[in-house]
Amino acid sequence: MAEEDVYTKDGTVDYKGDPADKKKTGTWKACPFILGNECCERLAYYGMSSNLVLYFKIRLHQHSTTASNNVTNWGGTCYITPLIGAFSRCLSREILDYSMLLDYLCSSLGTGGIKPCVSSYGADQFDDADEAEKKRKGSFFNWFYFSINVGALIAGSVLVYIQDNVGWGLGFGIPAAAMAIAVSTFFSGTRLYRNQKPGGSPLTRLCQVVVASFRKYRVEVPADKSLLYETADAESVIKGSRKLDHTQDLSFFDKAAVETQTNHIKEPVNPWRLCTVTQVEELKGDHTAASCMGHGSRLLISIYVHGLRGFSPPALCAWVDYLCLKS
């Protein structure tokens, strides 16, 4: 029993692929490297974006409208993540003055890659099966957003001052150095990280739920939701993920987890005919996220069409957050 307590119970492994040792990996031994990486990355991002309109106007001689539009496009590319950023190096370099703009577009690849992963990777450093570590996870997120704000504060004050009063070279060189520090800081903690095993393609799992649901479109979902199919093991069928509780939303897809007489004729269970509750709930969660993105996109398109007058960035963020909650 004492030997089992040495290792995490959530399936995480160390950098060698062995079960993660609680005393040697994770928790606050690993988190400072992740927080340092996030602080430097945010300093680099805001150090470039805060004064970018002015740079385009002064150095590239762009009109205010054109400069603002280019900065908005770059910021949007960073949030659309790696796909558009990957194309930035394929754009024409015929005009030398615009090479700086293309470099900024290339940076969207890195920004988009790290943004959806770093906070969840920090959460992976705490074992949910350990109550003491589970409580400390909330503290991590407090420090995580604090590190974001520290980076943004330094970028919006010190770096903007340097760019305006010292020079653009130093003003943009510091964010580049900060990004290099972010990368080196992150990799220096490799031996201390806990890593989740790959859980397979989420797209395949979502397709399995849809196919299984339509195959059983005539099947009635039982009133007692505990009768829906779920693995008997402590861990989820999705490697590295915990089981998800059933919710009432999108009840049609619950049909995918309804057991019929033909589901257990052949072993193992065919996931294209019978899915777990966790798989179904994963699809429901993705639908909620997609709804949030759809509402946010319609809001942004409306603002683009009708103009930005009267929309401050904090108000815009508040509206998007509100739409996400409503979804």
Image: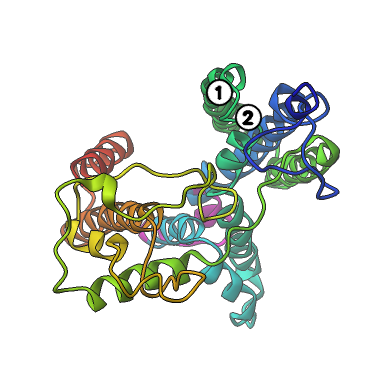
Q: Secondary structure at mark 2?
A: loop
Amino acid identity at mark 1: Lys
Label 2 close to label 1 by CB (< 8 Å): yes
The residue sitting at 69% across, 25% down in the picture is: 27
Magenta residues span 54-65
Q: Is residue 60 part of the magenta span, yes or no?
A: yes
Q: Judge by depth and name the residue closer to the eye, 295 or 151.
A: 295
Residue 29 at x, y percent in the picture: 77, 24
Q: Judge by depth and name the residue closer to the eye, 128 or 163.
A: 128
Quadrant of residue 297 in the image?
bottom left
Residue 119 at x, y percent in the picture: 56, 39
Q: Secondary structure at mark 1?
A: helix
Q: Which mark is residue 126?
A: 2
Q: Judge by depth and name the residue closer to the eye, 59 or 114.
A: 114
Vertical order, 205 against 89 (above or below): above
Q: Which mark is residue 134?
A: 1
Residue 231 at x, y percent in the picture: 46, 52
Amino acid identity at mark 2: Phe
Quadrant of residue 90 in the image?
bottom right
- Render colour scheme: rainbow
Q: Judge by depth and name the residue closer to the eye, 136 or 20.
A: 20
Q: How many marks?
A: 2
Kindly report the secondary structure that dominates the magenta region of the rendered protein. Answer: helix
Question: How many C-alpha atoms fall within 10 Å of the one at disc 1: few (<14), some, or many (≥20)?
Answer: some
Question: How many C-alpha atoms fall within 10 Å of the one at disc 2: few (<14), some, or many (≥20)?
Answer: many
Quadrant of residue 32 in the image?
top right
Q: Is residue 25 part of the magenta span, yes or no?
A: no
